[in-house]
Amino acid sequence: MQKLISAKEAASMVIDGMTVMVGGFLGCGSPETLISEIIKNGVKDLHLILNDTAFPDRGTGPLVVAKTASKVTASHIGTNPETIRQMVEGEIDVELVPQGTLAERIRCTGAGLGGVLTKTGIGTEVENSKQKIEVNKEVFLLETPISADIALIKAKKADRRGNLVYRLTARNFNPIMALAAKTVIAEIEEIVEVGELSPDEVITPHTFVHYLVKAGEGK
């Protein structure tokens, strides 16, 4: 299977109404080439699952500015005033999830778990409508897995089979999102031949990656 495709081909796989995970942390490690192409296509009504909505002009933020989403699930939105405006005006539904809980809910899907127990959110609005479970006389919230139709992630390097290497903190949510979607598209800064990567470097094995896109394509 030919994994290396154009950004345009990749973006065409994202259609109205999909649930889409997008990697990155305040713009660091976000697949901005893919994001740009998706915006060009005028996609609407997405459910975006993100750590944050970054800034209006970079990271995942432009997806919100372009009004591609009807819902956002994220750990915070405070650095993007447009997300806040759309939420206040009722233009977008925002589900705020504590950052660690968000990561664990995504990881649960890849690990085949039915959920994770956490004390985070007990006694706050977070616990509303959630199941509580008592373990050893302590009460926990049951947080259920999150999955997506497509995950758009970013890596520093990949071989042509799709084994991925990340750079420092740009790794962030990308590896766990690669485990939690039906289709995984990785934007790559450098593509090398099979055998050039040390096994010790590889964080996301090629079996989880369906397509590769070269970063900066079209710029």
Image (cartoon, rainbow, N blue to C red):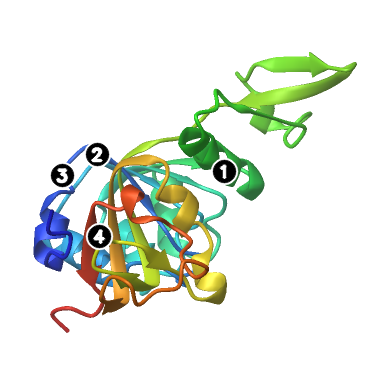
Q: Looking at this rendering, what residue extends furthest in the right direction?
A: 137
Where is mark 1, residue-wise?
Answer: 102
Pick whichever of labels 3 and 4 is earlier in the sequence.
Answer: 3
Foreground residue among 217 and 89: 217
Neighbourhood count class around disc 1 (C-alpha, 10 Å): few under 14, some 14–19, many 20 upward: many
User: Residue, x 43% and y 57% (percent of image)?
Assistant: 204
Dot placed on the residue nearer the N-terminal end, 4 or 2 = 2
The relative height of residue 29 versus residue 95 in the rendered view (above or below) is: below
Q: On screen, 158 above or below 94? A: below
Judge the density around disc 3: few (<14), some (14-19), many (≥20) Cα neighbours within 10 Å: some
Q: Is residue 124 left or right of residue 95?
A: right
Give the amino acid type for the residue marked by disc 1 in the picture.
Answer: Leu
Q: Work out how far the residue at label 1 is from the one at label 2, CA to CA, in angstroms.
A: 19 Å
Which is nearer the eye, 45 or 33? Answer: 33
Circles 1 and 2, Cβ within 8 Å, touching? The answer is no
Which disc number belongs to residue 15? 3
Rounded to the nearest angstrom, the CA distance separating label 4 from label 1 is 24 Å
Q: How much space separates mark 3 and mark 1, taking CA atoms?
A: 24 Å
Q: Position of residue 8 (x, y in %)?
A: 10, 64
How far, Cα to Cα, is label 4 from label 2?
16 Å
**Along the line of sight, the residue nearer the viewer: 128 or 214:** 214
Q: Which residue corresponds to the image point at 72% horizontal and 34% vertical from the top-left?
A: 121
Measured from the top left, where is residue 200 in percent x and y? 52, 68
| Numbered mark located on residue 66 in the image | 4
